[in-house]
Image: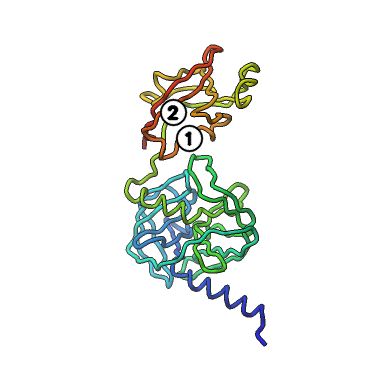
Amino acid sequence: MKHVLAELSHAIAAQVQAATPISVGLEWGTRQQISAVLWANGVIVTSEQALPEIESATAILPGGTRIAAIPAGRDPGTNIAALRLEADAPAMPRGVPQSVGEIALALGSDGAGSVRARMGIIETLGPAWQSQCGGRIDHLIRLDINLGGAAEGGPVIDAEGRLLGMSTFGPRRQVLVIPAATIDRGVAQLLAHGQIARGWLGAGVQPVQLPREIALEGPGNVGLMVLNIADSAPACGHMLPGDILVSASGVPLVSPRALTGLLGPESIGTTIEFHLLRGGVMTIRPVTIAARPA
């Protein structure tokens, strides 16, 4: 009679083995190492927050082959860094978890060409969300798993061997997954431009309480006060320090994150109508959004 636990063990080991070819180590300097994913031919991706500003690194491929990896682009908004190297990537099916409780396997390099693996479950699964740096992440995927620091940036797969994305640390060392769809969308821009272009208003803001009469008529009781405006910014000539932004294109501006959520790549070149409070009077100021300077 077949032993169920033995079959499960063999199946998990087989999925780890199948994903080993895309699990890469990345090191620089002395005793500095994280993990990465061989994402496409000639390209690896890793956690942007874990990679310092370096001119070159060494990729440790499965089997121990060491080759140069050159940073090609990075995006704090989606926490993706892309590096170029001379290596071909095996094809792996992409996937998205369907429910909380599914098994997830987080892989990382041991720094010598072998793989390390941790098993856990999908603890939290949610819709698209926005990072504090303004990046759109296609799915919220949080793992119930204990991940070592050197494994950050490695591949995360599900029980069917599908590539869910790349591991990274969130607040309080919670393990998050940057989804494959987010990485696929960002890599081409990073390789072509070194960054992911986003909209720019050029105004520094801070949440403030709205006057009671405005709050009663509007969508909330908090707005964003303009503190300063950068030289030659799109906001120049349309906003002044002291203005209170109440909404933009019908979206209540209750936090700086609400504002950055409107300034994604698709906003560049579009005109956004800002409802703002100036000297106690509500007014509408249209602003054409520009690309954020490098």
Q: Position of residue 213 (x, y in %)?
A: 64, 16
Residue that mark 1 sits on: 262
Q: Position of residue 74 (x, y in %)?
A: 41, 47
Front residue (pair 249, 66): 249
The residue drawn where x is 53% and y is 11% is: 279
Front residue (pair 285, 71): 285
Q: Are marks 2 and 1 in contact (CB under 8 Å)?
A: yes
Q: Position of residue 182 (x, y in %)?
A: 46, 51
What amino acid does circle 2 point to? Answer: Ile
Q: How many numbered discs sit on the rendered protein?
A: 2
Residue that mark 2 sits on: 272
- Relative to 217, say whether 150 is above or below: below
**In this rendering, would 3 be left or right of 40?**
right
The residue drawn where x is 65% and y is 17% is: 212
Q: Position of residue 191 (x, y in %)?
A: 34, 51
The local secondary structure at tag 2 comes to strand
The picture quadrant where one finds residue 9 is bottom right
Q: What color scheme is it?
A: rainbow
Q: Quadrant of the C terminus?
A: top left
Looking at the rendered structure, which numbered label has been put on residue 249?
A: none
Q: CA distance from mark 2 to mark 1?
A: 9 Å
The local secondary structure at tag 1 comes to loop
Q: Residues within 10 Å of mark 2 (few under 14, many from 20)?
A: some
Q: Earlier in the sequence, mark 2 or mark 1?
A: 1
What amino acid does circle 1 point to? Answer: Leu
The residue drawn where x is 44% and y is 53% is: 183
Pick out the residue farthest to the bottom. Answer: 1
